[in-house]
Amino acid sequence: MIGRLNHIAIAVPDLEAGAAVYRSMLGAEVSEPVPQPDHGVTVIFVTLPNTKIELLHPLGENSPIAAFLERNPSGGMHHVCYEVDDILAARDHLKAEGARVLGDGEPKIGAHDKPVLFLHPKDFCGTLVELEQA
């Protein structure tokens, strides 16, 4: 069921400073900021040969990233995203196995314009997991 690693998301208190670390210090290809109002974040993608890094910054007052940054003021790893062939089949299988799907359990369109779901970190070794339809 689980496919390739799509990205690792890192919450950052300063989006441009985070992008500069990857662009200047590490020489990576870095995208422009992309607001994602449905998810309460602005994202920048860092392209690597085998995956991506997603830098997350709060967008709006109800951003889940704002709460994360309150607990972790310097930022840090927020979630990992895995691709799945069929997000609804993956959701149903995981729920049958006892995993908790966050939100209303229905996929939303994510930053790559594909359906995504988030899974409770307590069910996955303390890590928030995002599933994205491949």
Image (cartoon, rainbow, N blue to C red):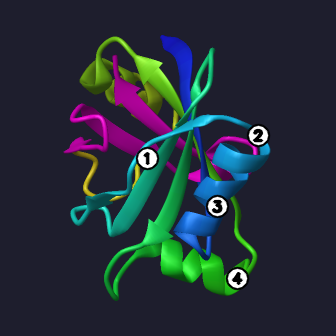
The residue that mark 2 highlights is 26
Crowdedness near tag 2: few (<14), some (14–19) or many (≥20) residues, C-alpha within 10 Å: few
Under circle 2, the secondary element is loop
The range drawn in magenta is 107-134
Tag 4 near tag 1, CB within 8 Å: no
Among numbered discs 2 and 3, the one appearing first in the sequence:
3
Among numbered discs 2 and 1, the one appearing first in the sequence:
2
In the displayed structure, would residue 90 be above or below residue 25?
Answer: above
Residue at 33% x, 27% y is: 92
The residue that mark 3 highlights is 18
Tag 4 near tag 3, CB within 8 Å: no
Crowdedness near tag 1: few (<14), some (14–19) or many (≥20) residues, C-alpha within 10 Å: many
Q: Is residue 3 visible?
A: yes
What separation in Å lies between label 3 and label 1 (alpha carbons)? 24 Å
Question: Residue 32 appears at what percent x and percent y?
Answer: 38, 50
What separation in Å lies between label 2 and label 4 (alpha carbons)? 27 Å
The residue that mark 1 highlights is 118
Front: mark 2 or 4: 2
Tag 3 near tag 1, CB within 8 Å: no
Question: Residue 39 appears at what percent x and percent y?
Answer: 31, 62
Q: Nearer the viewer, residue 19 or 125?
A: 19
Residue 71: give its label. 4
